[in-house]
Image (tube, rainbow, N blue to C red):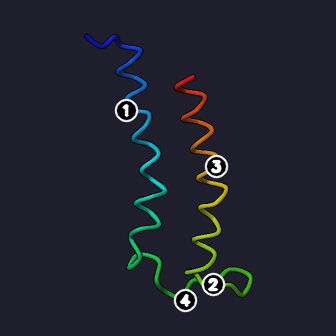
């Protein structure tokens, strides 16, 4: 039987799906507008997820550890 601590950790792993789904859903960000510093939305949206994904991985790691 799972303890409350194990249950807490099992849902925390699901947080790792956010970047996967956000980048897999291409019709959402396949556009030029809005541009940021001359970069179309398509590019800067993907670049934004690089540090966000690292932060999410760190949060999950600290939560499970």
- Pick whichever, 40 or 65, lies toward us: 65
Percent coordinates x, y for residue 29 in the rendering:
47, 77
Percent coordinates x, y for residue 19 in the rendering:
49, 56
Q: From the image, which quarter does the C terminus lie in?
A: top right
Count neighbours of disc 2 (C-alpha within 10 A) and say few if under 14, some if 14 to 19, many if 20 or more: some
Height in image: 21 above or below 2? below
Asked if the residue at tag 3 contacts the one at tag 2, i.e. Cβ–Cβ closer than 8 Å, the answer is no
Q: Which residue is the site of mark 4?
A: 32
Q: Residue at x 63, y 84 (%)?
A: 35
**Quadrant housing residue 47:** bottom right
Q: Which residue is drawn at 57% across and 83% down?
A: 34
Count neighbours of disc 1 (C-alpha within 10 A) and say few if under 14, some if 14 to 19, many if 20 or more: few
Percent coordinates x, y for residue 48 in the rendering:
63, 65
**Quadrant housing residue 21:** bottom left
User: N-terminal of the two: label 2 or label 3?
Assistant: 2
State left or right for residue 17 relative to residue 33.
left
Q: Which of marks 4 and 1 is in front?
A: 1
Q: Which residue is the site of mark 3?
A: 54
Asked if the residue at tag 1 contacts the one at tag 2, i.e. Cβ–Cβ closer than 8 Å, the answer is no
Distance from label 1 to label 3 (Cα)?
18 Å
Q: Which residue is the site of mark 2?
A: 35
User: N-terminal of the two: label 1 or label 3?
Assistant: 1
Q: Which residue is drawn at 58% across and 71% down?
A: 45
Distance from label 2 to label 4 (Cα)?
6 Å
- Which element carries disc 4, helix, strand or loop? loop
State left or right for residue 41 relative to residue 36.
left
User: N-terminal of the two: label 4 or label 3?
Assistant: 4
Distance from label 4 to label 1 (Cα)?
35 Å
Q: Which residue is the site of mark 1?
A: 11
Q: Residue at x 60, y 28 (%)?
A: 62
């Amino acid at each position: 039987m799972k303890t409350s601590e194990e249950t807490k950790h099992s849902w925390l792993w699901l947080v790792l799906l956010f970047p996967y789904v956000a980048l897999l859903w291409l019709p959402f960000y396949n556009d030029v507008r809005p541009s940021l510093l001359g970069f179309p939305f398509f590019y800067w949206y993907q670049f934004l997820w690089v540090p966000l994904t690292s932060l999410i991985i760190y949060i999950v790691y600290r939560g499970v550890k």
